[in-house]
Structures are given as structure tokens and as C-alpha cells.
Amino acid sequence: MKKGDSSADSWSFSVVIETKTELWKKLVLVPCKHCLEHRNMPEDFWGGYGIVLDAGSSHTNLYVYEWPAEKENDTGVVQQVEVCKVEGPGISGYSQTTEKAGPSLVQCLRQAEGVIPLKQHQETPVYLGATAGMRLLRLENKDAAEKVLSSVEKTLRSAPFNFQGARIISGQEEGAYGWITINYLLGNFKQSGWKKFLHSLKSVSETSGALDLGGASTQITFVPDEISSESPQNLLYFRLYGKDYRVYTHSFLCYGKDQALQQKLARDLQSTENSSLFDPCFHQGYQRTISVSNFFKNPCTSVEKKQFPFSQLHIEGEGNYEKCRRNIQNLFNKTDCPYSSCSFNGIYLPPLQGDFGAFSAFYFVMNFLNLTSDDPFTLDEVASAIKKFCARPWHEVKLQYHQIKEKYLSEYCFSGAYILSLLENGYEFTTENWKRIHFLGKIGSSDAGWTLGYMLNLTNMIPAEEPPAPPLSYGSYVGLMVLCSLVLVSVILLAWLLFHKPKCLQKGVV
Ligand SMILES: O=c1[nH]cnc2c1ncn2[C@@H]1O[C@H](COP(=O)(O)OP(=O)(O)O)[C@@H](O)[C@H]1O
Ligand SMILES: [Ca+2]
């Protein structure tokens, strides 16, 4: 397979999805020495930069990562040094003008050129991973999705970096790489000292679960207490630093916050005979008009398609949080569950376990609502804060937050209510384990998201086996030598005292 062939999903990736037994679908991190050769990367790859473009449904972000020259024996050494938000929509927004998708990335690629030293440009790998917006476009119009990918590939190949592929990643990968990122940044994979000792007593290491909310999909990934083989497509197996991890993951397409709103509106439309609608999830006084004909082209709403005697729908806000929650609840089908336990829509979910890092739109929304403090808010406090915000009239909200984009501002009430519905009704977080959700924007200098995990894996930076202990540092070596010398001198002194007792002691003279 040729380098950079974006049509192949697994050509040079050290993550390969394979079915090892009937029961396990395994996502194995292969310790592949040869991977670097396959990817035309220099052997002395350590000490450099890597670029990942996160082509999300709403927009594309370019991240530059840097790692030190020494292959350190600890996690958390790879760091984000730059992020650039691409102007305009996500690449799936170029379905009508596919040739413009690639050029939209040029400005951020130039910015990366300024950050990375010139002599390292050629060896710097660049990857683009597209998520749910492109998964939806592929469902709606495969040809347009391919053209968009070709356009971005063309642009990335013309940049001075080492192009490594532009592809649509699966929801399972998105969940897995998000989980890898946050646990890598939190230092959960490699422990030292007492922490390592404590963890070695347990069969499974303590890791943090990952909750990712995008515009078009949402992912939940964690290590459950007991693993059942009921739903193999939700189970992944990793071996990292010599430890096995059995991870549950699921990605819900159409349940990112933008598509969830589209789904909600599509349902509301079913019960209206006229061209205007009151919506409890928008502030009182807020108005929006949507085109009905475009609305049902989207795979997330197409099942609700029917003929309407009007082409424009006029929406008016009511600002009623409780009604909004009831309205959103209809998106989660909790009736049929073919497994021992489910989240919604008949999808297996094992009992929730441990702490969770909630990032991307989970963080953006909760941060806007001032609900992300270190001393976590209770579930009741969060609900009443969102209720209060939803009840504020639109003119007042707009006046106070005039600097915020109207699209975001007008939807924070819906988004807050949706986040609570997803977590409380969808995944069934309770008042008790709500405390274990931590809303994270960054960990250190790096954004929480799937991109770092993706790059760490593709550059083979997380080994399957624990690397041998490093040689001692100079300081520790000197310290050890001094300690040995002291012990040796003490032993000689003690022996001398025992075998050559001073005469005064031998004669019992005091
Ligand atoms: O500052 C912000 N405030 C509120 N929402 C934001 C902000 N920045 C990004 N978002 C939202 O976060 C979500 C990011 O989703 P993304 O584009 O990654 O989609 P995907 O992961 O489903 O492909 C979108 O809904 C976007 O509108
Ligand atoms: Ca995303």
C-alpha cells in the first residue's frame, strides 16, 4: 500500500482492529518497529513535531505537537504547542463546492510552518482525521465525501510537511483515541513509585473514562468493573506499557449537540400543522426561521420526512427548561434493551465506573454556564443554574454576552439541557456519580480530544510493553556510590570493633 493512500484504513497504522476470538473485537496497539519505515519516517524520530487536523462537523482545528529529543520513560512528554482554528465551516460543509475544502486549510498550515523550525518541516508528519460530519456526508453523498477528502489531501501534500493520510475515522476510534489522550495526559498509563506499587496489586489500572460531545456525534469510553461479552462491537482491548486494558466504547451518530437539536426540531415539526412553532429550549423573545426543504436531507432527520404545506418554519422561544427537558427526552428510546443494561436506543452500556473527563462541547457549554469549578457542582445545582439561564429573556442575554457568536449564545440553553438529558437520562448518571464527572478543556497545555491519542498511536509513541528501566542519572549514580561507600566503611568499623576490642574494654576498665 502506498504511503498516504487515504483509501486504506489500516495500511500503516499501529492500531489495527482485529477479531482475536469470537467474543473480542480487539483494537491492538502493535509495537511496530517497522511502522516508521512504512511511513518513510526517520529512525531518529524522537525530538520533533507532529501535526494533526481535527476535521470536525462544525469546524477544523489544526494542532501542532512537540516532543523532546530524548525518548523519555514517562508519559505526558508530548505536548501541544499550537492550535489554529480554520476559518469557515467544517470540511463536510463544502459538499457543494468540494474543491474549496482543501484551500480552506492553507492559512492554518502556514501558521504551523511558522511554529516548526524550517529544517524540521520535511520530517514532520501531518495527519487529518475527519469525524461525524464527514461520516454523515458519506451516508448522504459518497461521491461528495470522496471529493472533499481528495481536495484536502491535495492541499496537505502541497504543504512542506510529511503527509501521512487524510481519512474519516470511525466512531470507535474517536472514542478510543479520546480515552488514550486524557489518560496519557493525566499520567494514568505509567505510574512510578508507590502509585505503581499500588496499581500492581490490582488487576486493572485506574484510568479515567472519556466523554466527548461533538456537533454530530458523542462518545462514551471507559474501563468497566466487570466486562461482559454481550456486545463485542463495544469492547476494545489495549496493551499499553505492559498492561492490559479492556475498554468499553460507543459513539452515537446524530447525538452531537447540533444534530440532536436538528432531531428535536424534526420531531417537533411532525406535530405542527402550521408554519410557526414555540420552542421551550430557546429564550423568550428569540426567533429563528429554518428552511424545511433542506432540513430532511440530513441522515439524522430523514426518517421524520413528510410533506409540509410551507417551506419556511418560524421558531419562537419560550424559555421553559422543564418543558425543554421533556422535549429532549423523546430523543432517547429507553424501552428496548436486548442486553443486561443499556444506555438508549438498545445500545449496550455496562455499569458506569470511575471518574470521567468530559470534554469538547461538554466543556464549552458548562464553562459558559460557569459550572466547571474545581469544587464540582451537584446535579441539582447544575440543573437549577441551567433552568435560571433558560428563563432569561433573549434581549437581556444578548446584551450581556454581545461578544459571543449568536449561533452559540442562542443554543446554550438547549445545549445545557441536552447535556443533562444525555448524562442523566441517556447514560443514567445519578446524583452520586455525577461528582465523578470532570469537565475539562485542557490538561496542561494540551486540549482534551482525540487528536493527541491518534498521533501518539500512529507515531508508535505508546509502546505495548514497558520499556526497560533507564540507566541511572548522574546525580542518582553519585548518590548511590556515596551510600555504598558509607555502608562499606560502617561494616569495616563494626568488624574492627568486634575483633580488635580496645584493651580498656577487654580488661573491664571503666
Ligand atoms: O465556544 C464554543 N461554544 C459552544 N459550542 C462550541 C464552541 N466551540 C465549539 N463548539 C461546538 O462544539 C462542537 C464541536 O463539534 P465538532 O465540530 O468537533 O463535531 P464532531 O466531533 O461531531 O465531528 C460543535 O457543536 C460546536 O458548535
Ligand atoms: Ca469533535
Image (cartoon, rainbow, N blue to C red):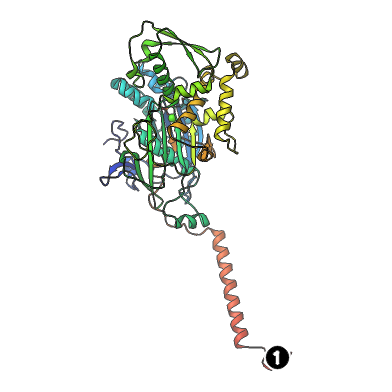
> In the image, 255: left or right of 194?
left
Quadrant location, the C terminus: bottom right
Q: Residue furthest top?
A: 309
- Specify whether residue 462 is in view: yes
Quadrant location, the N terminus: top left
Task: Look at the picture and state if 171 lies above or below 262.
Answer: below
Q: Residue furthest right?
A: 510
Percent of width and height locating residue 347: 35, 34
Report if the beta carbon of the residue with label 1 is closer than 8 angstroms to ligand 2. Answer: no
Towards the viewer: 244 or 85: 244
Percent of width and height locating residue 247: 38, 43
Badge 1, how many Cα within 10 Å: few under 14, some, many 20+?
A: few
Percent of width and height locating residue 438: 53, 38
Residue located at (63% from left, 84% from top): 497
Residue annotated with mark 1: 504
Residue located at (52% from left, 26% from top): 416
| Quarter residue 12 falls in | top left
Q: Amino acid at mark 1?
A: Cys
- Specify whether residue 42 is in view: no
> In the image, 481: left or right of 4?
right
Element assignment for label 1: helix
